[in-house]
Image (cartoon, helix red, strand yellow):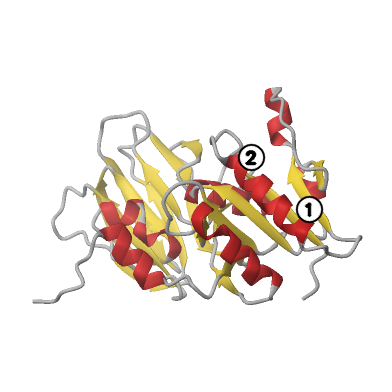
Amino acid sequence: MKLKKITCTGNFRKEKFFKIVDIISNYFDAAHLSQDFKLMLTNEFETQNQSVKVHKNINIDTFDNCIEGSDLIFSIGGDGTILSTVRKLSKKTVPILGIHIGNLGFLAQSTESTLIDALDCIMNNDYTIQDKILLKVKIEGDLDNKYYAFNDVVIDHGNSGRILRTSVYNNDDHINDYEGDGIIICTPTGSTGYSLSSGGPIVHSDLDVMTITPISSHSLSARPIVLSSNSNIKVKFSNNFTDAALTIDGQSRIDLVEKNIISISKANFNAKLVELPFYNYMTTLKEKLHWSGNSR
């Protein structure tokens, strides 16, 4: 594929953000691509009155203008930055390459130390694009009514210290009534996050499923369950409702009321992540979870 436009975005507050941008811009400058090639940088940093000098070959514009017609997005920061980028894209499914500032994350494919190798792969078209499922969230009684999650949807007891009681259904079939701090509904991508720390299973990121994990359940019989991605999960509250909130990918939080019914299903579009040939999911998983190489 002939590259015509690449957008750089991410967490400009991180110390090395603009250093990474400089490496990228110098690389493509030295590559002597055609004159119609554009390297874009989203302009969020300008709202902070930051005085930043960028390479002469970088065009600065709004996020929407930058991604219009982009072949790829370089999301620079951490895994949270990639989550934010996916949600900002919404249905505009531009492939994302995650460049992690610091140690390699679960979602990022590259760090500063492997950045040149990653850019070589991009230049040589030596990469694949992986489709990752998103969750669509609808809340009855919410005017905005529709949200998208890449990692997980968390429904918890909000500002209350009281038990949250929820009734959960799958395609109108009752699954369970949960009593505890809340529940997590996650994608395979999100299974190594909050769900894992709450006792949920690790689900390989290539699978097409979703998982429900109770948070600090008051019943030992309440266990995580893995469902088909074709499921339509509904969550209702009991009459003993005190308070509740819903959090999307750990970043967007919405207060809930007793009459709200939350519907969670697979979105009809996917997130697209660039996968490089030197990245290996199992290697990253073992590294992050400190799994031993020896079996006894």
One can see residue 138 in this view: no
Residue at left offset 64%, top offset 64%: 119
- Report crowding for label 1: few under 14, some 14 to 19, many 20 or more residues within 10 A (C-alpha): many
Q: Residue reaching furthest left?
A: 296
Q: CA distance from mark 2 to mark 1?
A: 14 Å
Which quadrant of the structure image shows residue 196?
bottom left
In the image, taking residue 171 as reference, residue 82 lies left or right, namely right
Residue assigned mark 1:
39
Compare residues 93 and 79 and report the one nearer the observer.
79
In the rendered view, would you say 72 is above or below 228?
Answer: above
Element class at badge 1: strand
Instruction: Report the amino acid beneath label 1.
Output: Leu
Residue at left offset 50%, top offset 55%: 113
Quadrant containing the N terminus is bottom right
Please provide percent x and percent y for residue 162. Answer: 25, 33
Residue assigned mark 2:
18
Element class at badge 2: helix
Quadrant containing the C terminus is bottom left
Q: On residue 254, which mark appears?
A: none
Please provide percent x and percent y for residue 27. Answer: 70, 57
Instruction: Report the amino acid beneath label 2.
Output: Phe
Please provide percent x and percent y for residue 209. Answer: 43, 72
In the image, taking residue 97 as reference, residue 261 lies left or right, namely left
Which quadrant of the structure image shows residue 118?
bottom right
Q: Earlier in the sequence, mark 2 or mark 1?
A: 2
- Report crowding for label 2: few under 14, some 14 to 19, many 20 or more residues within 10 A (C-alpha): some
Compare residues 123 and 6 and report the one nearer the observer.
123
